[in-house]
Amino acid sequence: MHAKPRWTEFLLPLFAGVFQGTVTRGVQWWQVHDPGMLRVPLDPLGWALVLAGPLALIVRRRHPVACLAVAVGSTAIFIGLGHPYGPVFLSPIVALHTAVARGHRRAAWSMWGLAYVFLVVYTSWLAPVRPAGWFHDLTVGALMGLVLVVAEFSRARRERQAERERVEEEELRRRASEERLTMAQELHDVLAHNISLIHVQASTALHLIEEHPEQARTALTTIKQASKDVLTEMRSVLNVLRDGAPRSPTAGLDRLDELIERSGLPVTKKIVGVAGPLPPGVDRAGYRIVQEALTNVTRHAPGASVTVVLGYDPRALTVQVTDSGGGTPGESLGSGNGVPGMRERASALGGTLTATHHGRGFRVEARLPIPEEPR
């Protein structure tokens, strides 16, 4: 069912009715008395035909073809009965524009062609004065063609605008989806790292609390800080999901020393090249890769020594995390989403990540390209 027309839809029909009636009455005097035209004055039928087109415009959005048929038909009858030329053509023009815009192009072109044929036949053989001639016919055809061209141009412009809006909406949805995936990945990394750290430190505290209470205190302090970090990260992401509020500063390599200190592992950090500012995506990915690698060591090779190497190059950041392992070779390999998640982070930036056994331990190495700055 169609919705009832809003009051604004009556403004154009009202204007067309007033304009056609007023101006037609104003121009009829000289057309009636002009020997070269010999039009007839308005009578009740003439007035009805003048107002039929504007009344049809009320339903132009719901029934564009019917509106165009009424507007063109009433105008043809009005002209055929000898009434004055003039603004009576306004309603068919508006109806044609609406029909084309609504996609009824074939019907619009057909009716417009029939209207042109009628005008040519009328002015050539049926008008009460001498035939208008070929120049008149060409002029009328050009004007009616111009109306069609304007209607088609308007339709094409609206379709392009609608397509642009559709593409922009899809792009916004794609970005929102990517952002949700990024937040899910970050939540996974944060939770996996800190909960693994809490588990290891809690086990250490339970083991040492009787004989070495001071060392147990250190472990409990680490647990407190790790739980605080988890809550902060989760609150930041949940605020985005709830309110669209800006996130707190995202963890980057500037917080790597803090991450190493909280890991509870003997970690050696090395810098190759000259450290400098990095694009946010590369900076965040480097931090998360080191975090996930340390989480894997904490889970699968607790107590193993770790070497973290950051290689700075104008074209790429290289991250290498190697652990000494424990027990049997490759014990720190582990399972789950850790390594795939790190590989996805690197791939999203156009980089690569390898995770392989290294002696009795495990090595994760990532290369994250740095986009060139536009010149």
Image: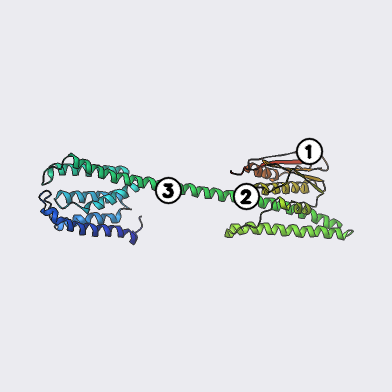
Which residue is the extreme one toward the front? 375
Residue 165's spot in the image, x, y percent?
Answer: 46, 49
- Residue 206 lies left or right of residue 236; in this view the side is right
Q: Marks 3 and 2: CB-CB under 8 Å?
A: no
Q: Earlier in the sequence, mark 2 or mark 1?
A: 2
Say what secondary structure mark 3 lies in: helix
Could you say which disc has been placed on residue 358 in the image? 1
Considering the image in quadrants, where does the N terminus appear? Answer: bottom left
Q: Which label sits in the foreground, 1 or 3?
A: 3
- Residue 360 lies left or right of residue 255; in this view the side is right
Q: Is residue 311 above or below residue 259?
A: above
- Residue 270 lies left or right of residue 32; in this view the side is right
Q: Residues within 10 Å of mark 2 (few under 14, many from 20)?
A: few
Q: Determine which quarter of the picture holds residue 338.
A: top right
Q: Give, as a three-letter code, the residue at label 3.
A: Gln
As measured in the structure, the alpha-carbon distance from the residue carrying label 3 to the one carrying label 2 is 31 Å
Q: Give, as a three-letter code, the residue at label 1.
A: His
Considering the image in quadrants, where does the C terminus appear? Answer: top right
Q: Is residue 327 visible?
A: yes
What residue is shown with label 2? 182
Query: In the rendered picture of this protein, how many numbered marks are placed on residues?
Result: 3
Say what secondary structure mark 1 lies in: strand
Q: Residues within 10 Å of mark 3 (few under 14, many from 20)?
A: few
Q: Determine which quarter of the picture holds residue 134.
A: top left
Residue at the image position 77 percent from the left and 38 percent from the top:
357
Residue 103's spot in the image, x, y percent?
Answer: 35, 46
As measured in the structure, the alpha-carbon distance from the residue carrying label 1 to the one carrying label 3 is 57 Å
Q: Is residue 209 visible?
A: no
What residue is shown with label 3? 161
Q: Is residue 100 above or below residue 233?
A: above
